Image (spheres, grey):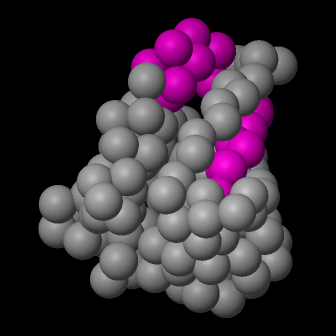
Amino acid sequence: MTLTSAAIKQEITFQASAERVYEILTSSELFSKAVGGAPTDISPEEGGMFSCFGGMILGRNIELVPNKRIVQAWRVANWEEGVYSIAKFELKEQGTETVLVFEHIGFPEGQGEHLASGWHTNYWEPIQKLLA
């Protein structure tokens, strides 16, 4: 499996505080609620493991800066053993909104388009619905 040097960069605005967005992204209960009850286990600790969508997405929290930044070693369960990408979530509060600047790098070649649309469908849209 060849890793690509391509990057996914997305910017999403949420009608919520950075604290609330961070809380959803780092809480098993809230993330599961956002994504329709899919089994979720997210460690709130730096270095802790996470599993979302019933084990389809797995990884480890590399850096957690409350209400500001989340960096994860992130993988899809069916990727080759030991292959991880890096997902970085930067939260920037602007008045009553939060802009999430997202970057995803180091994923397997040919996966970019699928992953880019998946972030919108499986993360951003459900989180926006939960916050509505």
**Left or right placement of residue 13 versus residue 122 in this view:** right
Residue drawn 72% across the image and 76% down it? 67
Above-or-below relation of 124 to 44: above
Pick the quarter of the image with the N terminus: top right
90 magenta-colored: no
Q: Residue furthest front?
A: 95
Residue drawn 49% across the image and 58% down it? 15
Above-or-below relation of 112 to 104: above
Pick the quarter of the image with the C terminus: bottom left
Above-or-below relation of 13 to 106: below
- Frontmost residue, 120 versus 58: 120
Instruction: Tell me residue 93's x, y (percent).
Output: 73, 63
For residue 53, say whether it is visible: no
Give the quadrant of residue 95: bottom right
Residue drawn 58% across the image and 40% down it? 12
- Frontmost residue, 84 versus 6: 6
Q: Which residues are magenta?
A: 98-116
Instruction: Tell me residue 33's x, y (percent).
Output: 24, 71
- Frontmost residue, 16 versus 81: 16
Instruction: Tell me residue 116's x, y (percent).
Output: 52, 25
104 magenta-colored: yes
Q: Residue furthest left?
A: 37
Instruction: Tell me residue 35's x, y (percent).
Output: 26, 58
- Frontmost residue, 37 versus 48: 37
